[in-house]
Every structure is written in C-alpha cells, then in structure tokens.
Amino acid sequence: MQFTRLRLAGFKSFVEPTDLLIEPGLTGVVGPNGCGKSNLVEALRWVMGETSARQMRGGEMDDVIFGGTTSRPARNHAEVQLLIDNAARRAPTAFNDASELEVSRRIDRGQGSQYRVNGRESRARDVQMLFADAATGANSPSLVSQGRVAAMINARPFERRAILEDAAGIGGLQARRKEAEQR
Ligand code: ATP
Ligand code: MG
C-alpha cells in the first residue's frame, strides 16, 4: 500500500485545507521551527487510528482541532484524509475491492471522532487493523517520534517484542488472537 496524498483541514496549525502529495520514493519535509512538520506526522498517525491524546502532544483529543490565533477564530472540527494506492490489493479483505482507498477521520469538538473508508462509515478498530496489517499503524515503528528511541532502548523484553511484531506486520494478527481468547 502506497500513501499518495494527505489532506488536512482544521487540524492543528493546518487551518485551511492543505494537500500534501506523496510521490514514490523519499519525501522530505523541511521548514523553520514551529511551521508544522511534526503536526503533519501527527496527522498521519491520527488518521491511522491513534487513540492517545498524549501521542498527539495534547491533553485531550479535541486539542487536534485548530485552536485559533489572535487573528483567527478557533474551528469546531478537524478532518484528515489519507489516500492510498491499493492497486497491488494488499488491504484486508473487507476493503480490498477498491484499487484506491480514501481513509478519513473527522473530529467534532466535544463529540468524538468518526472514520470513513471510501465514504462508508467504519469502526476505529477496522481502520487500525487496515494499517496494522500493512505494518504501518499509529503505533508502528515506522513512525519514530522524539523520545521514542530512548524508550525503545529502555523497554522491557516483552515490550520490545511487541515493537518487532508491529514491524513484521503481525501486530494486527496478535490483536485479533487476543480478542478471540477473551471471548
Ligand atoms: P520544530 O522544527 O521545532 O520541530 P515543527 O515544524 O515540527 O517545529 P510543529 O510542532 O509541527 O512544528 O508545529 C507547532 C505549531 O503548531 C505551533 O505554532 C503551535 O502553536 C501550532 N499548533 C499546535 N496545535 C495547534 C492547534 N490545536 N491549533 C492551532 N495551532 C496549533
Ligand atoms: Mg517538530
């Protein structure tokens, strides 16, 4: 699965709708301190199903919504869309009938968030699984935020195993097994 476009609106500092085209190969994002580079990575993490506000550098999830500046009022919702090339048909069965997947997540202040895949409402878990199976979930080691390297070094063996499982793309499988065992 290849990510081809990230679209943000009302998300953190990206108040106006913004498209980021992701071409094949390496993409670099450069800019001065505070211009929103980390916010972009967080948008990616968020649309893939991040549930921890702390991972988003906020106190609560509503903090991802543009909070206003001296010259601009705050917004009441934020939306992130991720376009994925699924021509190789690597997505889980439930989503695999389309050659392109548009995953979106929208949050309304005080009302929580909602996911859609190609316009159809989806559960958070299904979106998380979609990415876990592709070895690129919100928690995957392919997203390394500041402080994460030290955390990995200090992790206990079973925590480090979970990181390796996510990297190997079997994180989704393990989550399903755990669910089945609890039934
Ligand atoms: P650095 O190079 O220092 O790492 P950066 O490019 O990664 O900087 P970010 O951390 O992505 O910058 O962006 C920080 C900016 O985003 C700050 O100006 C902050 O005020 C703004 N910001 C974060 N959350 C919101 C929000 N909810 N509403 C409005 N602005 C926000
Ligand atoms: Mg940063």
Image (spheres, rainbow, N blue to C red):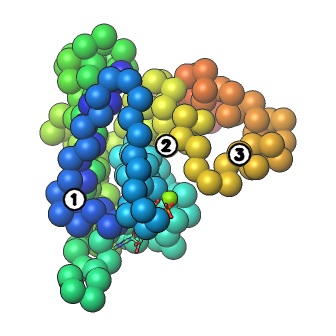
User: From mark 1 to mark 3, how far is it between C-alphas?
Assistant: 30 Å
What residue type is disc 1 on? Ala
What residue type is disc 2 on? Ala
Disc 1 element: strand
Query: Callout 2: few (<14), some (14-19), or many (20+) C-alpha neighbours within 10 Å?
Result: many
- In front: mark 2 or mark 1? 1
Position in image of residue 40 (x %, y %): 38, 52
Which residue corresponds to the image point at 29% horizontal and 28% vertical from the top-left? Answer: 23
Q: Residue furthest top?
A: 88
Q: Nearer the viewer, residue 32 or 19?
A: 32
Query: In this picture, is 147 found above or below 181?
Result: below
Residue located beneath label 2 in the image? 138
Residue located beneath label 1 in the image? 9
Q: Decide which of tag 2 and tag 1 comes sooner along the chain.
A: 1
What numbered label is drawn on residue 149? 3
Position in image of residue 36 (x %, y %): 38, 61
